[in-house]
Amino acid sequence: MSGGKLLETLAGTRFATPPIWLMRQAGRYLPEYRAVRATTRSFLEFCYTPEKATEVTLQPIERFGLDAAIIFSDILVIPDALGQKVWFEEGEGPKLEALTDPAQFGQLSRARLAEHLAPVYRAIKDTRAALPKETALLGFAGAPFTLACYMIEGSGSREFAKVKLWAYRHPESFALLIDLLVEAIVDHLCNQVEAGADAVQLFDSWAGVLPEEQLFSWSLEPMVRIAHGLRARHPKIPVIAFPRAVGPAALMYRRPDAFSALSLDTGMGAHWAARELQPHICVQGNLDPLMLVAGGPALEREATRILDKLAPGPFVFNLGHGVVPQTPPDHVAQLVEIVRNWKPSAS
Ligand code: CP3
Protein backbone atom coordinates (compact mmCIF):
# COMPACT_ATOMS: atom_id res chain seq x y z
CA MET A 1 0.00 0.00 0.00
CA SER A 2 1.26 3.50 -0.77
CA GLY A 3 0.87 6.36 1.66
CA GLY A 4 2.99 5.24 4.64
CA LYS A 5 2.90 7.00 7.96
CA LEU A 6 0.01 9.36 7.25
CA LEU A 7 -2.37 6.62 6.12
CA GLU A 8 -1.38 4.36 8.98
CA THR A 9 -1.96 7.18 11.45
CA LEU A 10 -5.42 7.85 9.98
CA ALA A 11 -6.10 4.12 10.41
CA GLY A 12 -5.20 4.33 14.10
CA THR A 13 -1.49 3.39 14.36
CA ARG A 14 0.66 5.49 16.73
CA PHE A 15 4.25 6.34 15.86
CA ALA A 16 7.00 7.79 18.06
CA THR A 17 6.54 11.10 16.18
CA PRO A 18 3.49 12.15 14.16
CA PRO A 19 3.37 12.52 10.37
CA ILE A 20 3.53 16.10 9.10
CA TRP A 21 2.22 17.95 6.06
CA LEU A 22 1.07 21.59 5.69
CA MET A 23 -1.98 23.15 4.12
CA ARG A 24 -0.84 25.29 1.14
CA GLN A 25 2.59 23.66 1.26
CA ALA A 26 2.89 24.31 -2.47
CA GLY A 27 2.59 28.05 -2.89
CA ARG A 28 4.10 31.47 -3.33
CA TYR A 29 6.50 31.22 -0.35
CA LEU A 30 8.61 28.83 -2.49
CA PRO A 31 10.82 30.48 -5.15
CA GLU A 32 10.56 27.34 -7.29
CA TYR A 33 6.73 27.64 -7.19
CA ARG A 34 6.88 31.30 -8.25
CA ALA A 35 9.14 30.34 -11.15
CA VAL A 36 6.65 27.77 -12.51
CA ARG A 37 3.67 30.03 -11.67
CA ALA A 38 5.21 32.86 -13.74
CA THR A 39 4.92 30.74 -16.88
CA THR A 40 1.07 30.92 -16.89
CA ARG A 41 -1.00 34.06 -16.49
CA SER A 42 -4.29 32.57 -15.46
CA PHE A 43 -4.36 30.71 -12.14
CA LEU A 44 -7.06 28.27 -13.32
CA GLU A 45 -5.14 27.52 -16.49
CA PHE A 46 -2.14 26.80 -14.25
CA CYS A 47 -4.29 24.38 -12.20
CA TYR A 48 -5.45 22.69 -15.43
CA THR A 49 -1.94 22.11 -16.83
CA PRO A 50 -1.06 18.64 -15.50
CA GLU A 51 2.73 18.96 -15.96
CA LYS A 52 2.83 22.21 -13.97
CA ALA A 53 0.38 21.05 -11.28
CA THR A 54 2.44 17.86 -10.86
CA GLU A 55 5.70 19.77 -10.68
CA VAL A 56 4.58 22.19 -7.97
CA THR A 57 2.85 19.44 -5.98
CA LEU A 58 6.19 17.62 -5.76
CA GLN A 59 8.27 20.70 -4.86
CA PRO A 60 7.62 20.75 -1.08
CA ILE A 61 8.14 16.97 -0.92
CA GLU A 62 11.52 17.26 -2.63
CA ARG A 63 12.56 20.15 -0.41
CA PHE A 64 11.26 19.03 2.99
CA GLY A 65 10.40 15.32 2.80
CA LEU A 66 6.90 15.82 4.18
CA ASP A 67 4.72 12.75 4.83
CA ALA A 68 2.00 13.82 2.37
CA ALA A 69 1.62 15.77 -0.84
CA ILE A 70 -1.67 17.57 -1.57
CA ILE A 71 -2.54 17.83 -5.21
CA PHE A 72 -2.09 21.35 -6.55
CA SER A 73 -5.55 22.59 -7.55
CA ASP A 74 -8.21 24.81 -5.98
CA ILE A 75 -11.60 24.41 -4.35
CA LEU A 76 -13.12 26.72 -7.00
CA VAL A 77 -12.57 24.24 -9.83
CA ILE A 78 -15.99 22.82 -8.90
CA PRO A 79 -18.04 25.96 -9.58
CA ASP A 80 -15.93 26.40 -12.70
CA ALA A 81 -16.70 22.82 -13.83
CA LEU A 82 -20.42 23.37 -13.11
CA GLY A 83 -20.45 26.27 -15.56
CA GLN A 84 -20.18 29.33 -13.29
CA LYS A 85 -17.67 31.93 -14.42
CA VAL A 86 -14.61 31.92 -12.08
CA TRP A 87 -11.40 33.94 -12.37
CA PHE A 88 -8.56 35.08 -10.13
CA GLU A 89 -7.57 38.69 -9.93
CA GLU A 90 -3.93 39.44 -9.20
CA GLY A 91 -3.62 40.45 -5.54
CA GLU A 92 -7.40 40.27 -4.97
CA GLY A 93 -8.15 36.57 -4.86
CA PRO A 94 -11.01 34.70 -6.49
CA LYS A 95 -13.93 36.31 -8.34
CA LEU A 96 -17.09 34.62 -9.58
CA GLU A 97 -20.10 35.79 -11.54
CA ALA A 98 -22.31 35.68 -8.44
CA LEU A 99 -25.54 33.68 -8.33
CA THR A 100 -28.35 36.08 -7.45
CA ASP A 101 -31.46 34.06 -8.26
CA PRO A 102 -32.38 30.39 -7.67
CA ALA A 103 -33.42 30.22 -11.33
CA GLN A 104 -29.68 30.30 -12.13
CA PHE A 105 -29.09 27.01 -10.31
CA GLY A 106 -30.72 25.26 -13.25
CA GLN A 107 -27.87 26.43 -15.45
CA LEU A 108 -25.29 24.65 -13.34
CA SER A 109 -24.70 21.10 -14.52
CA ARG A 110 -22.62 18.14 -13.40
CA ALA A 111 -22.75 16.63 -16.87
CA ARG A 112 -19.29 17.82 -17.94
CA LEU A 113 -17.52 17.77 -14.58
CA ALA A 114 -15.29 14.73 -15.22
CA GLU A 115 -14.29 15.98 -18.64
CA HIS A 116 -13.65 19.53 -17.42
CA LEU A 117 -11.55 18.32 -14.49
CA ALA A 118 -9.69 15.60 -16.41
CA PRO A 119 -6.41 17.61 -16.16
CA VAL A 120 -6.66 17.47 -12.35
CA TYR A 121 -7.04 13.68 -12.47
CA ARG A 122 -4.16 13.42 -14.91
CA ALA A 123 -1.98 15.45 -12.51
CA ILE A 124 -2.97 13.11 -9.66
CA LYS A 125 -2.05 10.06 -11.71
CA ASP A 126 1.35 11.51 -12.69
CA THR A 127 2.05 12.79 -9.17
CA ARG A 128 1.24 9.43 -7.58
CA ALA A 129 3.59 7.74 -10.04
CA ALA A 130 6.40 10.18 -9.20
CA LEU A 131 6.01 10.20 -5.39
CA PRO A 132 7.92 7.89 -3.07
CA LYS A 133 5.52 5.15 -2.03
CA GLU A 134 5.70 6.12 1.65
CA THR A 135 4.42 9.63 0.84
CA ALA A 136 0.62 9.89 0.83
CA LEU A 137 -1.13 11.82 -1.93
CA LEU A 138 -4.14 13.83 -0.77
CA GLY A 139 -7.01 14.85 -2.99
CA PHE A 140 -9.39 17.54 -1.74
CA ALA A 141 -12.53 19.57 -2.32
CA GLY A 142 -14.21 22.58 -0.77
CA ALA A 143 -17.21 21.64 1.37
CA PRO A 144 -20.63 22.71 0.03
CA PHE A 145 -21.15 25.65 2.37
CA THR A 146 -17.75 27.21 1.60
CA LEU A 147 -18.32 26.76 -2.13
CA ALA A 148 -21.80 28.29 -1.78
CA CYS A 149 -20.18 31.28 -0.02
CA TYR A 150 -18.01 32.02 -3.06
CA MET A 151 -20.78 31.19 -5.54
CA ILE A 152 -23.30 33.56 -3.95
CA GLU A 153 -20.96 36.33 -2.69
CA GLY A 154 -18.95 36.33 -5.92
CA SER A 155 -15.68 36.65 -3.94
CA GLY A 156 -14.36 36.31 -0.40
CA SER A 157 -16.25 38.37 2.18
CA ARG A 158 -16.08 39.55 5.78
CA GLU A 159 -19.73 39.21 6.71
CA PHE A 160 -21.08 36.65 4.22
CA ALA A 161 -24.40 38.49 4.42
CA LYS A 162 -25.65 37.46 0.97
CA VAL A 163 -25.11 33.74 1.40
CA LYS A 164 -26.39 33.71 4.98
CA LEU A 165 -29.50 35.71 4.16
CA TRP A 166 -30.21 33.39 1.24
CA ALA A 167 -29.87 30.33 3.50
CA TYR A 168 -31.98 31.90 6.28
CA ARG A 169 -34.74 33.34 4.09
CA HIS A 170 -34.98 30.62 1.45
CA PRO A 171 -33.74 27.36 3.00
CA GLU A 172 -35.54 25.24 0.37
CA SER A 173 -33.74 26.84 -2.54
CA PHE A 174 -30.43 26.93 -0.63
CA ALA A 175 -30.84 23.18 -0.03
CA LEU A 176 -31.07 22.64 -3.80
CA LEU A 177 -27.69 24.32 -4.27
CA ILE A 178 -26.14 22.35 -1.38
CA ASP A 179 -27.53 19.08 -2.80
CA LEU A 180 -26.09 19.81 -6.24
CA LEU A 181 -22.72 20.56 -4.63
CA VAL A 182 -22.81 17.36 -2.54
CA GLU A 183 -23.26 15.33 -5.72
CA ALA A 184 -20.58 17.23 -7.64
CA ILE A 185 -18.11 16.90 -4.75
CA VAL A 186 -18.73 13.13 -4.41
CA ASP A 187 -18.05 12.80 -8.17
CA HIS A 188 -14.90 14.91 -7.93
CA LEU A 189 -13.53 13.03 -4.90
CA CYS A 190 -14.30 9.60 -6.41
CA ASN A 191 -12.52 10.65 -9.60
CA GLN A 192 -9.51 11.83 -7.58
CA VAL A 193 -9.36 8.51 -5.71
CA GLU A 194 -9.68 6.57 -8.95
CA ALA A 195 -6.76 8.61 -10.33
CA GLY A 196 -4.57 7.72 -7.32
CA ALA A 197 -5.39 9.93 -4.30
CA ASP A 198 -4.80 7.95 -1.08
CA ALA A 199 -6.99 10.12 1.17
CA VAL A 200 -9.02 13.32 0.83
CA GLN A 201 -9.59 16.50 2.80
CA LEU A 202 -12.80 18.54 2.82
CA PHE A 203 -12.19 22.27 3.43
CA ASP A 204 -15.08 24.07 5.11
CA SER A 205 -13.11 27.27 5.49
CA TRP A 206 -16.12 29.49 6.25
CA ALA A 207 -18.13 27.10 8.46
CA GLY A 208 -17.32 29.34 11.45
CA VAL A 209 -19.69 32.11 10.29
CA LEU A 210 -22.77 29.93 10.91
CA PRO A 211 -24.75 29.61 14.16
CA GLU A 212 -24.96 26.11 15.60
CA GLU A 213 -28.19 24.83 14.08
CA GLN A 214 -27.30 26.14 10.61
CA LEU A 215 -23.84 24.67 11.04
CA PHE A 216 -25.44 21.27 11.47
CA SER A 217 -27.67 21.63 8.40
CA TRP A 218 -25.33 23.38 5.98
CA SER A 219 -21.86 22.21 7.04
CA LEU A 220 -21.84 18.96 9.02
CA GLU A 221 -24.74 17.15 7.41
CA PRO A 222 -23.63 17.74 3.79
CA MET A 223 -20.04 16.77 4.69
CA VAL A 224 -21.26 13.52 6.25
CA ARG A 225 -23.33 12.80 3.13
CA ILE A 226 -20.24 13.37 0.98
CA ALA A 227 -18.11 11.05 3.13
CA HIS A 228 -20.79 8.35 2.98
CA GLY A 229 -21.17 8.84 -0.80
CA LEU A 230 -17.41 8.51 -1.31
CA ARG A 231 -17.17 5.51 0.98
CA ALA A 232 -20.04 3.73 -0.79
CA ARG A 233 -17.71 3.57 -3.79
CA HIS A 234 -14.34 3.52 -2.01
CA PRO A 235 -14.88 2.08 1.47
CA LYS A 236 -11.27 2.38 2.67
CA ILE A 237 -10.51 5.99 1.70
CA PRO A 238 -9.86 8.24 4.73
CA VAL A 239 -11.66 11.60 4.83
CA ILE A 240 -10.19 14.50 6.82
CA ALA A 241 -12.75 17.19 7.70
CA PHE A 242 -11.66 20.82 8.23
CA PRO A 243 -14.58 22.80 9.64
CA ARG A 244 -12.64 25.99 10.27
CA ALA A 245 -13.31 28.27 13.25
CA VAL A 246 -16.32 26.39 14.61
CA GLY A 247 -15.06 26.44 18.23
CA PRO A 248 -16.64 23.94 20.62
CA ALA A 249 -19.15 22.97 17.90
CA ALA A 250 -16.26 20.80 16.66
CA LEU A 251 -17.75 18.25 19.08
CA MET A 252 -20.50 17.45 16.57
CA TYR A 253 -17.92 16.62 13.90
CA ARG A 254 -16.70 13.64 15.94
CA ARG A 255 -18.19 11.26 13.40
CA PRO A 256 -15.94 8.24 12.90
CA ASP A 257 -18.61 6.77 10.59
CA ALA A 258 -17.77 9.60 8.15
CA PHE A 259 -14.40 11.15 9.02
CA SER A 260 -11.01 9.62 9.85
CA ALA A 261 -9.63 12.87 11.25
CA LEU A 262 -10.62 16.42 12.17
CA SER A 263 -8.35 19.25 11.11
CA LEU A 264 -8.25 21.96 13.79
CA ASP A 265 -7.83 25.67 13.18
CA THR A 266 -5.40 27.74 15.22
CA GLY A 267 -8.07 28.95 17.64
CA MET A 268 -8.81 25.46 18.95
CA GLY A 269 -7.14 24.75 22.30
CA ALA A 270 -4.77 21.79 22.08
CA HIS A 271 -5.54 20.75 25.66
CA TRP A 272 -9.30 20.84 24.99
CA ALA A 273 -8.88 18.92 21.72
CA ALA A 274 -6.78 16.24 23.46
CA ARG A 275 -9.52 15.76 26.06
CA GLU A 276 -12.70 16.17 23.98
CA LEU A 277 -11.83 15.13 20.44
CA GLN A 278 -8.87 12.76 20.40
CA PRO A 279 -10.49 9.96 22.42
CA HIS A 280 -13.03 9.74 19.56
CA ILE A 281 -11.13 10.71 16.44
CA CYS A 282 -7.64 11.46 15.09
CA VAL A 283 -6.91 15.20 15.01
CA GLN A 284 -4.73 17.29 12.70
CA GLY A 285 -3.34 20.77 13.26
CA ASN A 286 -3.00 23.42 14.44
CA LEU A 287 0.11 25.60 14.48
CA ASP A 288 -0.53 29.27 13.76
CA PRO A 289 0.81 29.92 10.21
CA LEU A 290 2.37 33.13 11.57
CA MET A 291 4.52 31.05 13.97
CA LEU A 292 6.05 29.64 10.81
CA VAL A 293 6.76 33.19 9.65
CA ALA A 294 8.28 34.04 13.05
CA GLY A 295 10.53 30.94 13.19
CA GLY A 296 13.30 30.67 15.82
CA PRO A 297 12.54 30.06 19.49
CA ALA A 298 8.86 31.14 19.16
CA LEU A 299 8.27 28.42 16.57
CA GLU A 300 10.17 25.85 18.61
CA ARG A 301 8.20 26.62 21.78
CA GLU A 302 4.80 26.61 20.14
CA ALA A 303 5.35 23.50 17.99
CA THR A 304 6.64 21.65 21.07
CA ARG A 305 3.65 22.77 23.13
CA ILE A 306 1.28 21.35 20.48
CA LEU A 307 3.30 18.12 20.21
CA ASP A 308 3.34 17.65 24.00
CA LYS A 309 -0.45 17.98 24.11
CA LEU A 310 -1.48 16.12 20.97
CA ALA A 311 1.28 13.76 19.80
CA PRO A 312 0.45 11.09 22.41
CA GLY A 313 -2.96 10.60 20.76
CA PRO A 314 -3.71 9.88 17.11
CA PHE A 315 -2.31 13.04 15.53
CA VAL A 316 -1.17 14.56 12.25
CA PHE A 317 0.99 17.68 12.58
CA ASN A 318 -0.23 20.55 10.38
CA LEU A 319 -1.01 24.26 10.54
CA GLY A 320 -4.31 25.77 11.67
CA HIS A 321 -4.68 27.26 8.15
CA GLY A 322 -2.54 27.59 5.03
CA VAL A 323 1.14 28.59 4.74
CA VAL A 324 1.27 32.34 4.03
CA PRO A 325 3.37 33.82 1.19
CA GLN A 326 5.83 35.65 3.51
CA THR A 327 6.95 32.36 5.16
CA PRO A 328 10.72 31.76 4.92
CA PRO A 329 11.18 28.23 3.50
CA ASP A 330 13.95 27.59 6.08
CA HIS A 331 11.36 27.84 8.83
CA VAL A 332 9.44 24.95 7.27
CA ALA A 333 12.64 22.90 7.36
CA GLN A 334 13.09 23.94 11.02
CA LEU A 335 9.53 22.81 11.81
CA VAL A 336 10.03 19.41 10.18
CA GLU A 337 13.17 18.95 12.32
CA ILE A 338 11.30 19.89 15.49
CA VAL A 339 8.48 17.43 14.75
CA ARG A 340 10.78 14.57 13.76
CA ASN A 341 13.03 15.05 16.82
CA TRP A 342 10.24 15.49 19.36
CA LYS A 343 10.28 13.24 22.42
CA PRO A 344 7.58 12.93 25.06
CA SER A 345 8.55 14.94 28.16
CA ALA A 346 9.32 12.92 31.29
CA SER A 347 6.52 14.52 33.34
O1 CP3 B 1 -0.72 23.20 -1.35
C1 CP3 B 1 -1.98 23.11 -1.23
O2 CP3 B 1 -2.57 23.28 -0.17
C2 CP3 B 1 -2.76 22.64 -2.45
C3 CP3 B 1 -3.39 23.63 -3.23
C4 CP3 B 1 -4.52 24.48 -2.71
C5 CP3 B 1 -4.73 25.80 -3.20
N1 CP3 B 1 -5.91 26.26 -2.73
C6 CP3 B 1 -3.82 26.50 -4.12
C7 CP3 B 1 -3.91 27.96 -4.25
C8 CP3 B 1 -5.59 24.20 -1.83
C9 CP3 B 1 -5.84 22.97 -0.98
C10 CP3 B 1 -6.47 25.33 -1.86
C11 CP3 B 1 -7.75 25.38 -1.12
C12 CP3 B 1 -8.51 26.62 -1.09
N2 CP3 B 1 -8.67 27.55 -2.09
C13 CP3 B 1 -9.33 27.03 0.00
C14 CP3 B 1 -9.54 26.25 1.28
C15 CP3 B 1 -8.43 26.43 2.23
C16 CP3 B 1 -8.38 27.79 2.86
O3 CP3 B 1 -7.40 28.52 2.54
O4 CP3 B 1 -9.27 28.13 3.64
C17 CP3 B 1 -9.94 28.26 -0.35
C18 CP3 B 1 -10.86 29.09 0.52
C19 CP3 B 1 -9.52 28.58 -1.69
C20 CP3 B 1 -9.93 29.72 -2.53
C21 CP3 B 1 -8.77 30.54 -2.91
N3 CP3 B 1 -7.83 30.18 -3.88
C22 CP3 B 1 -8.39 31.81 -2.41
C23 CP3 B 1 -9.14 32.58 -1.34
C24 CP3 B 1 -7.23 32.20 -3.09
C25 CP3 B 1 -6.51 33.52 -2.99
C26 CP3 B 1 -5.72 33.58 -1.74
C27 CP3 B 1 -4.27 33.84 -2.06
O5 CP3 B 1 -3.44 33.30 -1.29
O6 CP3 B 1 -3.99 34.51 -3.06
C28 CP3 B 1 -6.87 31.15 -3.98
C29 CP3 B 1 -5.70 31.10 -4.89
C30 CP3 B 1 -4.70 30.02 -4.60
N4 CP3 B 1 -5.05 28.71 -4.46
C31 CP3 B 1 -3.30 30.17 -4.49
C32 CP3 B 1 -2.79 28.88 -4.27
C33 CP3 B 1 -1.34 28.49 -4.10
C34 CP3 B 1 -2.51 31.46 -4.65
C35 CP3 B 1 -2.60 32.01 -6.03
C36 CP3 B 1 -1.33 32.04 -6.87
O7 CP3 B 1 -0.34 31.32 -6.62
O8 CP3 B 1 -1.32 32.79 -7.87
Image (cartoon, grey):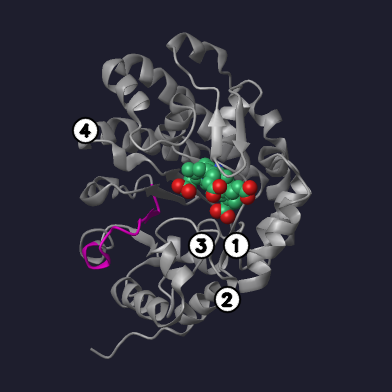
- For mark 1, what is the residue? 29
- Foreground pick, 250 / 298: 298
Question: Looking at the image, is 112 positioned above or below residue 10?
Answer: above
- In magenta, the rendered stretch is 259-272
- For mark 2, what is the residue? 330
Question: Looking at the image, is 39 positioned above or below residue 335?
Answer: above
Left or right of 130, for residue 138: left
Q: In which quadrant will I find the C terminus?
A: bottom left
Name the disc covering residue 22, or none: 3
Residue farthest to the front, as pictured = 91
Q: Tell me how many marks there are.
A: 4
Q: Position of residue 314 (x, y in %)?
A: 36, 67
Residue contact between numbered discs 2 and 4, judged by CB atoms under 8 Å: no
Callout 2 secondary element:
helix
Q: Amino acid at mark 3?
A: Leu
Q: Amino acid at mark 2?
A: Asp
Q: Badge 4 local density, few (<14 within 10 Å), some, or many (20+)?
A: few
Q: Position of residue 191 (x, y in %)?
A: 62, 38
Residue contact between numbered discs 3 and 4, judged by CB atoms under 8 Å: no
Residue contact between numbered discs 3 and 2, judged by CB atoms under 8 Å: no
Callout 3 secondary element:
loop
Question: Looking at the image, is 91 positioned above or below residue 225?
Answer: below
Q: Residue at x 43, y 56 (%)?
A: 321
- For mark 4, what is the residue? 213
Instruction: From the image, state whether disc 3 or disc 2 is nearer to you.
Output: 2
Residue contact between numbered discs 2 and 1, judged by CB atoms under 8 Å: no
Q: Badge 3 local density, few (<14 within 10 Å), some, or many (20+)?
A: many
